[in-house]
């Protein structure tokens, strides 16, 4: 009788996952581990063959525990759960709300959040502020910030996150601004440069990343990273390293 379980990973490359799993594979003779890319995440399938159901479940549980210990918060879900579902579940349990301010993703983060049934319990809404004028008019980003640092910068996403949180009166404000390409990049800010901001309580945080791929892939990775930021913040886990 075959048994298997799928763990979903975000923030580790396939080579990093393979290297991490090497020792575990050798120590678990009855367990087969397979990893595959499901951009922008990766999946690890724990497989085994056991006739004894209790023994099979024990082996699966043991392997999952070891993988989680090795990969930490990069493991964000099991089975069919998606990042937005995991985040939504945590927000609902803690009776918290979230709002989003999007530039380069053009509403994708809000789209993902509202794919989850019942998301109105915690998602208050979002603002797509694509132009500098909309960032100033809708979110209160200062003209001085935009002139000094540019739309794709830490100060701008900090003000975007703070602005959307204040305007929609949410517990958490999440923001993104970047260059999705294929044009628009510069030497200082090449295509794929993305800044993410988060405002909650008295904290305003931000970080810079550089993603590779097509315009659609950069947008999807940006949305995923933003959701991961909110998830990690709620669990008091460190954010994935940027540049």
Image: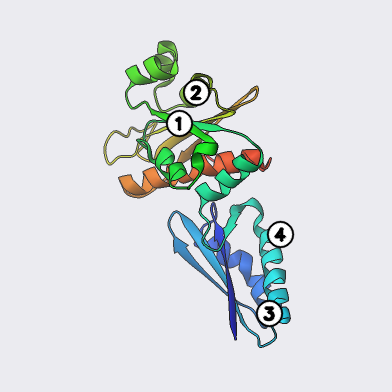
> Could you tell me which secondary element the residue under label 4 belongs to?
helix
| Contact check, label 3 and label 4, Cβ < 8 Å | no
Mark 2 and mark 1 in contact? Answer it, CB < 8 Å: yes
Q: Residues within 10 Å of mark 2 (few under 14, many from 20)?
A: some
As drawn, the label of residue 69 is 4
Image quadrant in which you'd find residue 129: top left
Give the alpha-carbon distance from disc 4 to disc 1, as whole Å: 35 Å
Residue 51, percent from left and from top? 66, 88
Identify the disc placed on residue 168. 2
The tag earlier along the polypeptide, 4 or 1, is: 4
Mark found first going from the N terminus, 2 or 3: 3
* Camera-nearest residue between 187 and 128: 128
Q: Secondary structure at mark 2?
A: helix
Q: Which mark is residue 125?
A: 1
The answer to whether marks 4 and 2 mark residues whose Cβ atoms lie closer than 8 Å is no
Query: Alpha-carbon distance for marks 3 and 4?
Result: 20 Å
Q: Earlier in the sequence, mark 4 or mark 2?
A: 4
Kindly identify which residue carries mark 3: 56
Of 120 and 45, the residue lying toward us: 120
Few, some or many C-alpha atoms within 10 Å of disc 4 (few <14, some 14-19, many ≥20)?
A: few
Q: Nearer the viewer, mark 3 or mark 4?
A: 3
Q: Gap in Å between the C-alphas at discs 3 and 1?
A: 44 Å
Image color mode:
rainbow
* Rendering coords of residue 227 (x, y %): 52, 42
Residue 196 is at least partly visible in this image: no
> Residue 134 has which mark?
none
Q: Earlier in the sequence, mark 3 or mark 1?
A: 3
Q: Residues within 10 Å of mark 1 (few under 14, many from 20)?
A: some
Label 1 SS: strand
The residue drawn where x is 50% and y is 54% is 82
């Amino acid at each position: 009788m075959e048994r298997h379980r799928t763990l979903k990973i975000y923030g580790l490359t396939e080579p990093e996952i393979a290297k991490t799993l090497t020792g575990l594979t050798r120590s678990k003779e009855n367990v087969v581990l397979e990893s595959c890319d499901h951009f922008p995440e990766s999946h690890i399938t724990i497989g085994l063959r056991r006739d004894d159901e209790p023994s099979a479940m024990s082996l699966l549980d043991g392997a999952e525990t070891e993988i989680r210990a090795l990969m930490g918060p990069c493991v964000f879900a099991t089975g069919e759960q998606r990042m937005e579902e995991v985040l939504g579940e945590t927000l609902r349990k803690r009776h918290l709300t979230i709002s989003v301010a999007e530039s380069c993703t053009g509403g994708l983060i809000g789209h993902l959040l509202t794919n989850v049934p019942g998301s109105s319990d915690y998602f208050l809404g979002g603002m797509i502020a694509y132009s500098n004028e909309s960032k100033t008019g809708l979110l209160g980003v200062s003209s001085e910030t935009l002139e000094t640092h540019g739309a794709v910068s830490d100060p701008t996403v900090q003000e975007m996150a703070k602005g959307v949180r204040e305007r929609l009166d949410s517990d958490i404000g999440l923001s993104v601004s970047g260059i999705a390409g294929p044009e628009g990049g510069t030497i200082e800010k090449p295509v794929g440069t993305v800044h993410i901001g988060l405002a909650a309580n008295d904290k305003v945080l931000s970080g810079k990343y550089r993603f590779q791929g097509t315009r659609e892939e950069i947008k999807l990775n940006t949305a995923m990273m933003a959701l991961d930021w909110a998830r990690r913040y709620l669990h008091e886990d460190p954010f994935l390293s940027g540049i």
